């Protein structure tokens, strides 16, 4: 617990920290990677280059400092951080490293303003949050290890199937080398993978793209232009190759309810929507499955989704192509704007929308759905990277 004086110091200095938060995190990461190179591999370096991760940490620090005496409002944000950390197997000893480097970065950026009293208050505040995260993460690690087919830390998996799904997306089925079962995940969740690319250890998250079956997991990867891991998976990884995976995690999962589901995905954002659709259909819910793709050549999983439609009357797929080519068979063409989405909304009450895709796509779809009267609390979205503001 922070003392009343420490809370007062945090409140007094929070505006200065907030005003410099991006400079602080921009100083923090290079300092940490230089001083403790062993933690570098767990961070996606593209998220450093784009500043998405430094900004996510800066926003978390600002939110924390501004709510230092009412931490309960941070609940959902904390859960998102915990899930991302758990997917990458973040451990308590690494909090020492982050704490030391963060305090040093604050000192470097704010200079003499960081008196002994200020350093003490921010150090105490860091450890209050760190202890909260460490405890929540430990609970998740222990819970996953206790599940049937569950485990803790890295587990060796073998690629047992590699299937092209479109010109840019390929699926990989991963089965544990130990031959044991794998824990069920919640549809919408993702894996953390650890693999060696060109002699360097790297980590990436991939959504699970097929419903749980107890035996293996499927991920589906889009080849990113100049992408390190996606190109390696597409070009070099073959059936029989091995990599490490941490247990599934994530909070982009089906919410309670009986109302219809509107799944709106763009490009490879379709991956978590596939098991989510199957779960909702099994629960007897109506599913409107809207998928936006550039054209038929990059449209993955059409066969799988069409088969679902043949099996379930309550499932309606809608394919929208921005730039259809001769021979393509979309239901709609152009961009998914307000009018196109309005035509797809069901009459039933209790609609929930799940949106996944590139940031501008999610921003446009969520803005259109909100304009159509869907309350923000009924719309959830997932970032394939650190969370960012959609505005
Ligand atoms: C929760 C979650 C779920 C995800 N699910 C999926 C999924 O189901 N399928 C999927 O395909 N992906 C998914 N991702 C994204 C995935 O984790 C990777 O980010 C993605 O595969 C790209 O990784 P990469 O190593 O190929 O690209 P990176 O090497 O990380 O590069 C990413 C982009 O940055 C650019 N870049 C890299 N270096 C530079 C540089 N020096 N200068 C300028 N630009 C540069 C590259 O051109 C590329 O376009 C998910 C991510 C998260 C967080
Ligand atoms: C109080 C301490 C910490 C806070 C407030 C914090 C905050 C965050 C936030 C806000 C994100 C982005 C989550 C998202 O949008 O998905 C994140 C991701 C991450 N955090 Fe932490 N974190 C802390 C400690 C740590 C520690 C100790 C490590 C271990 C080295 C760590 C490693 C990571 C990694 C690897 C990611 C994903 C980065 C990426 O995608 O490149 N964090 N953290």
Image: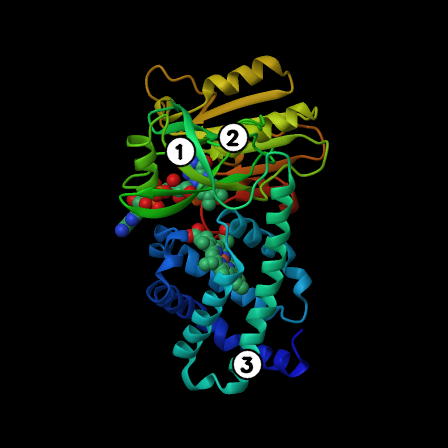
Viewer-closest of 62 and 366: 62
Mark 1 burial class by Cα count in 10 Å: few <14, some 14-19, many 20+: many
Asked whether residue 344 appears in the rendered view, the answer is no
Question: Measuring 51% from the left and 64% from the top, which residue is drawn there?
Answer: 95
Rendered image: mark on residue 94 = none
Q: Position of residue 50 (x, y in %)?
A: 35, 54
The answer for how far apart the CA atoms under marks 1 and 3 are is 45 Å
Q: Which mark is residue 120?
A: 3
Q: Quadrant of ligand 1?
A: top left
x, y percent for residue 271: 48, 32
| Front-most of residues 387 and 206 | 206
Residue 250 versus residue 293 in the image, above or below: below
Q: Is mark 1 in CB contact (under 8 Å) with mark 2?
A: no
Tag 2 secondary structure? helix
Residue at (57, 70) in percent of width and height: 127
Please say whether residue 40 is visible from this viewpoint: yes
- Discs 3/2, front: 3
Kindly give the residue lying farthest to the front in the view shown.
178
Instruction: Name the colouring of the figure.
Output: rainbow
Residue density around tag 2, few if under 14, some if 14–19, many if 20 or more, within 10 Å: some
Tell me which label, 3 or 2, sits earlier in the chain: 3
Q: Secondary structure at mark 3?
A: helix
Q: Is residue 313 above or below residue 1?
A: above
In front: label 1 or label 3: 3
Q: Which mark is residue 221?
A: 1
> Tag 3 or tag 1, which sits nearer the N-term?
3
Direction from residue 276 to residue 19 in the image, left or right: left
Q: Badge 2 is on which residue?
A: 340
Q: Is residue 197 left or right of residue 390?
A: left
Residue 302 at what x, y percent from top left?
46, 20
């Amino acid at each position: 617990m922070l003392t009343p004086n420490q809370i007062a110091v945090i409140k007094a200095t929070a505006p200065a920290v907030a005003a410099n938060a991006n400079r602080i995190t921009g100083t923090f990461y290079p300092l940490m990677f230089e001083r403790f190179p062993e933690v570098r591999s767990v961070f996606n370096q593209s998220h450093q280059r784009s500043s998405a991760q430094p900004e996510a940490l800066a926003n978390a620090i600002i939110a924390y400092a501004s709510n230092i005496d009412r931490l309960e409002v941070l609940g959902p944000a904390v859960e998102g951080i915990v899930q991302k950390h758990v997917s990458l197997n973040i451990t308590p000893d690494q909090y020492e490293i982050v704490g030391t480097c963060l305090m040093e970065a604050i000192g470097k950026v704010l200079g003499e303003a960081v008196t002994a009293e200020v350093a003490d208050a921010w150090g105490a505040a860091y450890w209050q949050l760190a202890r909260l995260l460490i405890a929540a993460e430990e609970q998740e690690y222990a819970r996953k290890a206790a599940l049937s087919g569950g485990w803790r830390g890295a587990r060796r998996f073998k690629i047992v199937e590699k299937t092209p799904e479109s010109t840019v997306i390929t699926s990989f089925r991963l089965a544990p080398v130990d031959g044991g079962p794998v824990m069920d995940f919640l549809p919408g969740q993702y894996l953390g993978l650890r693999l060696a690319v060109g002699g360097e250890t790297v980590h990436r998250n991939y959504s699970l793209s097929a419903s749980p079956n107890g035996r293996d997991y499927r991920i589906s990867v889009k080849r990113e232009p100049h992408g390190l891991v996606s190109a390696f998976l597409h070009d070099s990884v073959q059936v029989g190759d091995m990599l490490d995976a941490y247990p599934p995690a994530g909070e982009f999962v089906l919410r309670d309810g009986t109302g219809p589901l509107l799944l709106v995905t763009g490009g490879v954002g379709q991956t978590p929507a596939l098991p989510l659709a199957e779960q909702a259909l099994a629960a007897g819910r109506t599913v409107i499955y809207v998928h936006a793709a550039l054209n038929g050549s990059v449209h993955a999983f059409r066969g799988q989704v069409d088969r679902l439609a043949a099996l379930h009357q309550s499932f309606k797929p809608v394919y929208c192509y921005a730039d259809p080519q001769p021979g393509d068979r979309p239901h709609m063409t152009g961009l998914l704007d307000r009018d196109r989405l309005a035509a797809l909304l069901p009459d039933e009450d209790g609609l929930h929308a799940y949106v996944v895709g590139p940031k501008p796509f999610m921003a446009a779809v969520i803005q259109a759905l909100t304009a159509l009267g869907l309350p923000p609390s009924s719309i959830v979205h997932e970032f394939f990277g650190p969370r960012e503001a959609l505005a």
